Image (tube, coloured by chain):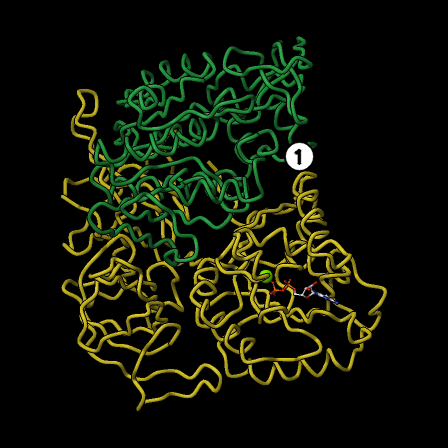
Amino acid sequence: MIRLLESESIFVLREVAAQFNNPALLFSGGKDSILVSWLARKAFYPARIPFTFIHIDTGHNFPETMDFRDWWMNELGVKLVVGSVQEAIDRGMVAEEKGYNASRNLIQTAVLLDTIEKYRFDAAIGGARRDEEKARAKERFFSHRDEFGQWDPKNQRPELWNLFNGHKRQGEHFRVFPISNWTELDVWEYLATENVPLPSLYFAHERAVFERDGMLLADCEYIPRRPHEVPATETVRFRTIGDMTCTGAVRSSAASASEIVREIAALRVTERGTRSDDKRSETAMEDRKKQGYF
Amino acid sequence: MEIKRTELLRFTTAGSVDDGKSTLIGRLLYESKAIFEDQLEAVKKASERSGDGEINLALLTDGLKSEREQGITIDVAYRYFSTPNRKFIIADTPGHIQYTRNMVTGASTANAALILVDARRGVQEQTRRHAFIASLLQIPHLVVCINKMDLVDYAEDIYQQIRREFELFAAKLDVKDVHFIPISALKGDNIVNRSDNMPWYQGSALLYYLENVHIGSDENLIDPRFPVQYVIRPLTDTHHDYRGYAGRVASGAFRKGDEVLLLPSGFTTRIRRIDTYDGELEEALPPMSVTLLLEDDFDLGRGDMIVRVHNKPEITQDVEVMICWFSDRPLQPGGKYILKHTSSEVRCIVKEIRYKLDINTLSRNHLDLHIGMNDIARVLLRTTRPLFLDSYRKNRTTGSLILIDEATSETAGAGMII
Ligand SMILES: Nc1nc2c(ncn2[C@@H]2O[C@H](COP(=O)(O)OP(=O)(O)O)[C@@H](O)[C@H]2O)c(=O)[nH]1
Ligand SMILES: [Mg+2]
């Protein structure tokens, strides 16, 4: 099963290299983008991955993510460009949210579009999957973006067979999603089988956390706590890794990828259930995607 | 690196608006436990708001804001579920006429099509349209789900009558395998288990059928075709002379040592190695992504094709296709388009529109040759360079192409080579 998905993803990645002049790979440090980079290494072996990597750094990342990123870029021998949200705030390009639930998730989009424009990338590969969220279920492999970087879900190009149309007009670009057809369980089964290196955050560890809106948040300097929110040390892991302010932990003792496979097979909540950025409203993801989020 | 092709079934759903496609998919996801608690909670809440009592499983698949507002499906949504036997990818496609292009999209990669018919309304214009598209796109297995049986007292004669009506129409189509199942997507009859409400039905429940339908021979394993997708040239010290032809096996098998013919050059050589990141392979089968290394140093590029010496595709600049038109700019006789076929891209001119097909009657209209959005026509194209092609009936990969509008860059049509 995972071999079928692997061969499809490799096909898509090679299509990107063939059809675009200046493609980039969006690397968040999360398992999905690590998987995509792993598949990219396979797709072009023994040559180097022909994509520049982009990291949109919210400034609120887990330190473990940053360490992993630098180590992995070096392993792959690829070039990394960083779009800094902090810098964009300092320049006044975007304004930061205030309050207890403040997150830099929304303003990330502006920084991403700015980075794509600055380096003139004509395609940005992402690790989004259709099973993640209902708006993502409608995505194409080759997803067209207008000159404002926006997604028009009602007017998407039909995508037939394996014939991907990467033609576009000046100023437009594409988002490409090679692992569209993978489910969370497929991803973990593959990561376990292939022994793919991952940030330690994904595995059970002790951490000071506190509860908010049914989520376990890491106690850290970026999240102001209300008086009744008292942190306690628990054994947790993260199912998705984003910005510290919007990524919730789950109580878990799974210490390896294969233990995670077993855990997920029994789980009854989606991984996006641990993301407060998606809980803001029923169409939170669709709204962000239309604006240019990946 | 073993690929088990039968572990994955792709299917599409079709039918008129309100025949119950979204409900059926919601039901399959729900029953196979592919729905998580937070998704179910969200759907329950939304169902309460719209206030029709029962949880509306259709809300699980209608993802976009405008879809939920209008209560219709607009774009293809992909859904995933698995049972211990298989993984399933569903392309949930809308039933409205104006979205027929999405049905074609979903159908292009499907092993099976579920066509829903409302038991109260019988075979509709859209049912015929969708059955025809399924046959045109050569979906190997067709399952006609006669839905809402609960609203017709689970009556056998209604089921039999719709079945006869459909068979009469399907006799004119090119379909290999048609199956009929009476169901209620809403109540769950004949979805996972055989229903007690329809003891007269002797066949299997839908999920059992999907888990067991034989798809091992859906792919062409006879004619070896390897479109060169990308050339791998590391140019590093350790791999200085490495020149690998990366691609996905479209059909047939390639073995190390095989004598192969290169197109368009016509040179012959042998396969020296079949490379992957995980090591060398003895044999590559569809749909594996591999890298071929050849004995002799020929300079192949993207769009070239590696085939076997005694099994050549057709090499031609005159391409006859059945085309589904997607663009609101009509197909222009004499018009020029970009044509994508396997990994090659050429320009083409529309030499002749032979006829437009009326997909309700399947009759050919030679007089009205205005080909607008959602029309299907037989067309002759002339390309700037030769294509290496097979008929779509023989080979879904080397028999398919798309046309791209040069002005808008949009995918304007999909062609099945005759
Ligand atoms: N009684 C009954 N109603 C059904 C059944 N399947 C679907 N419906 C209802 O028919 C309506 C349309 O269903 P929906 O799944 O949205 O149809 P779609 O347009 O084909 O996706 C909804 O109100 C469903 O609840 C069924 O088997 N029995
Ligand atoms: Mg629907």
Query: How many numbered marks does the figure carry?
Result: 1
- The residue depicted at 38 percent of the width and 63 percent of the height is B395
Q: Amino acid at mark 1?
A: Val
In the image, A18: left or right of B365? left
Residue identified by numbered label 1: A269
Q: Secondary structure at mark 1?
A: loop
Within the image, what quadrant is residue B278 found in? top left
Place of residue A136 in the rendered image (x, y in percent of width and height, measured from the top left): 49, 44
Mark 1 neighbour density, 10 Å: few (under 14) some (14–19) many (20 or more):
some
In the image, B170: left or right of B233? right
- The residue depicted at 34 percent of the width and 63 percent of the height is B400
- Up/down of A195 relative to B299, above or below: above
Q: Quadrant of the C terminus of chain A?
A: top left
Chain that is green in the image: A
Place of residue B391 in the rendered image (x, y in percent of width and height, measured from the top left): 34, 68
Place of residue B219 in the rendered image (x, y in percent of width and height, measured from the top left): 45, 57
Q: In the image shown, does B213 or B198 lie closer to the viewer?
A: B198
- The residue depicted at 55 percent of the width and 29 percent of the height is A188
In the image, A216: left or right of A84? right
Chain that is yellow in the image: B
- The residue depicted at 73 percent of the width and 69 percent of the height is B148
Q: In the image shown, does B249 or B37 lie closer to the viewer?
A: B37
